[in-house]
Each structure stands twice: as structure tokens, then as C-alpha cells.
Image (tube, helix red, strand yellow):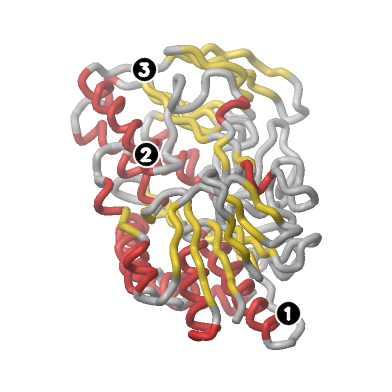
Amino acid sequence: MAHIVVLGAGTGGMPAAYELREKLGKDHRITVVNAVDYFQFVPSNPWIAVGWRNRDQITFPIRPYLAKKNIEFLAQPVSKIDAEGSALEFPDGSRLTYDYLIIATGPKLAFDEVEGAGPKQFTHSICTVDHAEEAYKDYQQLVENPGPVIIGALPGASCFGPAYEYAFIVNRDLRRRKIRNKVPMTYITSEPYIGHLGLGGVGDSKSMLESEMRNNDIKWITNAKVTKIEDGKMFVTELDELGQIKKEHEVPFKFSMMLPAFKGVDPVASVDGLCNPRGMVIVDEYQRSKKFKNIFSAGVCVAIPPVEVTPVPTGTPKTGYMIESMVSAIVHNIWADLNGHTPDSKGTWNAFCLADMGDTGAAFIALPQIPPRNVNWFKKGRWVHWAKIAFEKYFIYKMKQGSSEPIYEKHVLKWIGIERLQNTK
């Protein structure tokens, strides 16, 4: 009997555990380790941060749902990965040995790379449900006493979709409250242009998102290197396309949400030979560590190079569709290894996103993620808003159900009527 440990219980870790149980049957032991005892549906955090959702609607306790599938669960932070000894170490001194380890921790939020950034200082985040709740507290104060708002992404950021979502959601919420005219909004991003998304653009993303921002009176600064943040003021160096200083800005704000760059979490980043200099896990085409053959990794914690060099550093996003394919590849490859076969399953690193804009939305598909692409598709419309709501409810339902079924591949692409695009990849 093999023991497979899944480190992380998010949108990669939970499906990995369920799919392992389905694929491997009852003959092998599976344990999920997570720093907290609840699952959170991170894509809903922009709604939390304006009060459109509450915590109970997008979280649930992990243990009872894993127990139904005979999957063990430890709600503890890991202090160290002993990769040579195939064990996890915990702050209380205990150890958990494994035959295979799947790292799906998500990232460490690198607020420390910009002075004054982060929820403990002067800007907010929607990267976790706790951060989103803190943002909502200050957002309520903004509603009571309106003033300028800055939303965007710091240098090195890779996950731009939620920043666009939150900007448009805040815009819509303020309009509903009849106070949008009292709140100047600026979108500040490390992207070289609006709609870059860390992907070099997708379809008409540049023109469509610029149009939405103009129509909603949202100003923007691109190629923005945020250098320092003080209480109520953001210092921004705007670069040109050659990386030379174009303009220095001091932008006032009453409320700000800035997405940070990502790094690897400490116990993962500290394993010699496992990660790149940012602490992201280096994997081969089979999602397996190049140094430790019994370690696999999926999700945001995986090292993927930028799509292109940009004047201000930007990373490459990892969307749910990509993470799902990584997880499926890992499960198949562990099964193959256990049965004496050579791992041969590869994740399809394609990008798919549903981004809500309050009462409309934008959807894009990039197949493959890195250009040139077979499919380069970007659309907007009210249907995306409703599709995002439906997907939230469906994903949480499937996680509570313990489903091992690939949600994106089997359902979501068909729901939005573009499954025909899959045939072109």
C-alpha cells in the first residue's frame, strides 16, 4: 500500500485527493494536509470584498467531506519538507512520511517586495477570504465617506483577472449606491497595456477592456512600477515600452486593493533543488519534480516562465482549467508508476477564465497559453456574469459531493457554448 500526501486543499488539492481515490481505489492511503481546516472558493473573493457574498457561502469544513471518501486530513501548517527522507515535518515536531507528495499549496503573497503594501499596511488584497473580509470592512468606510480608489497589480504580479474583476465590481456597486460620482477610480498595473493579463493579450482583450474602462470612467496607468505606498498615497514610476522612465506619479487614495507578486511558500521554497529562485516548483512535462521523482506539483505554486519580457515584470497566470489538467496528469502518472508503467500523461497548459464585472463580464480562452495559439478567444456580455455565479455554486457543490470528474473539461466549456473550440487544439 502506498501513501500519497496532498499538500494544500484548494482548487487543486481537493480535486487531486478525490481523483486519487477514484483512480487508485481503496488499496492506497491518501492524506490531505492544509494550514486551515476549511476550503475556500477563491474566485468569489471579489464579491466578498463588496459584501455581495459572505464567508459561509464560499467556504466549508474540509474534514467531513474527505472522510466520506476515506481520505485522511491534517489541519496543520508544515514547517519543513524533508524531500530526501520523504516526510513532512510539523511545528510540534511530528512527521508524516509519504511515498508520493503532491504540492498544491498555492503561493506566498509577496507584499514585502513593495514598501507599504498589503493588508497589514496600506493596501488590501482579495487573495484569501480573510483578506477579502478585511477589505470589505474598509470598503464600508469608503461608502460612508467616499474618496479616491486605486485597484490593480504590483510589479511581478501574475494573476490579473481578479484585479479587473474587482475594479468593475466596485464600480458597479458604487453606481447602485448612487455615489460613484464621488469616487474617482484609477487602475494601476504592471501590465504593458490594459488587457495584457500576463498572457500577451487574448483576442481583443486590449480594446474591449480599455473600452469598458473608458465607459465606466476608470483611469489607468500601465507599465506601472509601484515603488512605495504610504497612508493615502501611492508612488508609481511609469515606464515606456523600452523600460525607461516616462513619468513619476503620486496618486492619492482613500481605499486601495493591489494584487501582489507570488513566491513559493517557505517550506516548499527552502527545499534544495526543488524550486526556482522565486520558490516555485520546477516540474517536467509530467508535473513531476526534476530532482525528486516522488514529488509532483500543480497549480499556482508551479514554475512557469513569463509569456514575454515586459518593461515591468509580469508573471504568467495559472487558471482553474490549467490546474485541473495538471491534477489529472499527476493522478494518472502516480497510478502508472504504482503499476510499473512509465508516466506519460501531460497537463494541457491552456488558459480559460470567467471574469465578473458586476452585471456583465468577460471570458477568454487561450489554447495554448503561450502564443502563437490555436485558439485566441475573448468575449464579453451579461451571460458571463451569470456563468460565473453558476460555476461558483456548481464547483462548491461538486467539492462537497467528492466528485473526481473534470469540471472544466466535462461541463464548463459546454455550458458557455464554445466546446467546439476544443476541437481545434
Question: How far is mark 1 from mark 2, CA to CA?
Answer: 39 Å
Disc 3 marks a residue whose amino acid type is: Lys
Q: Find disc 1 in the rendering and name its residue.
A: 344
Disc 1 marks a residue whose amino acid type is: Asp
Work out which quarter of the rendered image holds the C terminus and state it. bottom right
Tell me which numbered mark, 3 or 1, is placed earlier along the sequence.
3
Corner quadrant of residue 166: top left
Question: How far is mark 3 from mark 1, CA to CA?
Answer: 52 Å
Relative to 308, 31 lies left or right: left
Q: How many residues crowd mark 1 within 10 Å: few (<14), some (14–19), many (20+)?
A: few
State the residue in front, 8 or 109.
Answer: 8
State the residue in front, 296 or 159.
Answer: 296
Depicted 163 relative to depicted 104: above or below: above
Residue at the spot x=25%, y=45% of the render? 54
Q: How many residues crowd mark 3 within 10 Å: few (<14), some (14–19), many (20+)?
A: many
Tell me which numbered mark, 2 or 3, is placed earlier along the sequence.
2
Depicted 97 relative to depicted 24: above or below: above
Relative to 29, 42 lies left or right: left
Corner quadrant of residue 153: top right
Disc 2 marks a residue whose amino acid type is: Asp
Tell me which numbered mark, 1 or 2, is placed earlier along the sequence.
2
Kindly state the secondary structure of the residue where label 2 is placed.
Answer: helix
Q: How many residues crowd mark 2 within 10 Å: few (<14), some (14–19), many (20+)?
A: some
Kindly state the secondary structure of the residue where label 3 is placed.
Answer: loop
Residue 78 position within the rendered picture, expressed as x and y whole percent measured from the top left: 56, 49
State the residue in front, 180 or 250.
Answer: 250
Task: Say the numbered circle drawn on residue 254.
Answer: 3
Kindly state the secondary structure of the residue where label 1 is placed.
Answer: loop
Residue 370 position within the rendered picture, expressed as x and y whole percent measured from the top left: 70, 57
Q: Find disc 2 in the rendering and name its residue.
A: 130
Task: Say the numbered circle drawn on residue 195.
Answer: none
